[in-house]
Image (spheres, grey):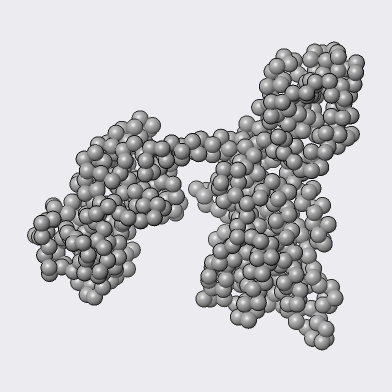
Amino acid sequence: MKTPSELPARKQVGRSGCDKSYKSVPFGGKQGGTAECKPLQFRPCTDEDESGKACLRFRRLSMEKDERLSTIRHSMAHVMAEAVLEMFPGAQIAIGPSIENGFYYDFELPRQLTEADLEEITARMKAIIKAGKEFKRIEVSRDEAREMFKDQKYKLELLDAIPEGETVTIYNQGAFTDLCRGPHVASTKELNAESFKLLSIAGAYWRGSEKNAMLTRIYGTAWSNPKELRTYMDHLADVERRDHRKLGKDLDLFSLHEEAGPGLVYWHPRGARIRQAIEDFWRKEHYKNGYEMVYTPHVGKSWLWETSGHLGFYRDSMYPPMEMDKADYYVKPMNCPFHIMIYNNSLHSYRDLPCRWAELGTVYRYEKAGALHGLMRVRGFTQDDAHLFCTPEQMDDEIEEVLRFSIHMLKSFGFEDFHAYISTRPEKSVGDPALWDSATEALRKAVEKAGLKYDIDEGGGAFYGPKIDLKIKDAIGREWQLSTVQFDFNLPERFKMTFVDKDGKEKRPLMIHRALLGSIERFFGVLLENYAGAFPPWLCPDQVAIVPVGESAFDYAKALEKRFKEAGLRAYADLSGDRMNAKIRKAQQLKVPYQVIIGEKEMAADQVSIRYRTGRQANGVATEAFIAEVKDIVDRKAQLD
């Protein structure tokens, strides 16, 4: 790859003066007027450039912290790329953006990298930072850029993707030049050599397509000062401690098996007990709130998906068809067409509405292998789906009620910090604009009545209706989208849904898609990370571990297990040959909230000695009092203090 100084017939302008024949371009902006490409130049800046904007390249950046950090991280990605090219001069470079909390760069390298390589790259980066290399923004013609990157195939592909007429810019810092729009810091002196860290090495397909080459991606993080870096690294350690994939294995909750099918979850007995507790509560609350349960098939003929539009718009995310009886069947990616089939099975009057039908429906969607992530991104999952069919007059009340129900459910699982996002009509949409407006207003009024903080995403709705996304913050401040309330003005038309109104005329019902938890799998992962595996007792797979002091207490332990189970508690007696301390340690590792120790004294007095998960202890507690204590905290869905 050639540097700017290596290109022929170059007129370079130094810092002491400016060639006035070249138009000055605002840092990071687009050139106005002619699009003619002039000879390569290093443009010096005065205090104000020709557009009247303050020049940024030869002064320190003054911007909001987030923008400043984004610029630092982008510049650090370039520094890392320079260091990698020092180690591997023939390497191919791809892209290197700033991302939330860090940066990365993708490379095609002659060999796999090791942790030792990361240390070497880090040392070289610190040397580059110390050298105080200036970042120079340069406008070039396409031909100049092609000459400069003639040995870099990925840069040439990116160059070809730049629209005609758009200015081509490069950034140079010493020996490294990149095709880039910026912005960057003025000099590597603005980067702190003790405020960054290279985090990991991963594989990444070029342009995210499995059809393309697998590149080596190096992730890093960068901050303004060492204190911020230490704070972030502590946060990362907490995130790692809470990783649901690790906890799922450590607590024996679930597994995924690549050889049997990626993205498909196997629920172990302990995980299944938690899932059952979630689903039992979900069903109970739905019945209390006026919903009816439905069950629908896992597959449907192509006619169903052609009518719904999924085959036309969603085919790439569907599993391929199965041919049977000269017809194509597809496993369902959605539950909604099936609920519509139930609705259309009979005539409906306005007196029958609203209909609220709910289903824990398992669906299958194709996700690229590289996008799969534990329980958070899978190919087979169970949606806590519901569809509401109502009249326009019922719309406000239904939206208000479903939002109240969403908040109630999420609070029951311990979440308290909510933020709503309302997405409105995009440029291309279906349905009456007046209906869009009234539906959007119903969403806004419901959010305001619930007292939620909210933002409006203008034009961000799906083409078929506006929606609310409800996001929560977990124990370490991460935001997760869980509940969705979505109008659909498309499917009622496609399936010709009707109801007979008061005037005796057939009309279209309003259809509202609604998910409270999102999917059981993803919600389980969020819960697992939020509580770091230490669930509230009502969700724990094992609420009580019974630890006999010796074999003489085994029979009593078994009787106590039966007694606890008859009281509705999830309990087990550890009758293994391990020592008592090992049994207690195992229960602690499994995060069992109550460990009951029984010996001769407890047996004689019908008492238990309790070791709580929190470390607190209580001795000589009457067994019935203990049962009442656990049942009370379970019924209240409270967490152990």
Percent from the top left, x then y, of residue 72? 34, 48
> At x 72% / y 14%, what residue is drawn?
579
For residue 120, which quarter of the picture? Answer: top left
Q: Is residue 432 visible?
A: no
Percent from the top left, x then y, of residue 437? 62, 77
Count of marks, rendered view: 0
In front of the other: 419 or 389: 419
In front of the other: 134 or 40: 134
> At x 53% / y 71%, what residue is drawn?
459
> At x 66% / y 48%, what residue is drawn?
415
> At x 17% / y 59%, what residue is drawn?
44
In front of the other: 114 or 415: 415
In the picture, which quadrant includes the C terminus?
A: top right
**Residue 18 higher or lower than 116, as above or below:** below
Percent from the top left, x then y, of residue 323? 66, 60
Q: Is residue 613 left or right of residue 129?
A: right
**Residue 32 higher or lower than 408, as above or below:** below
**Residue 381 higher or lower than 330, as above or below:** above
Percent from the top left, x then y, of residue 550? 80, 13
Q: Is residue 146 left or right of residue 377?
A: left
**Residue 402 higher or lower than 272, as above or below:** below
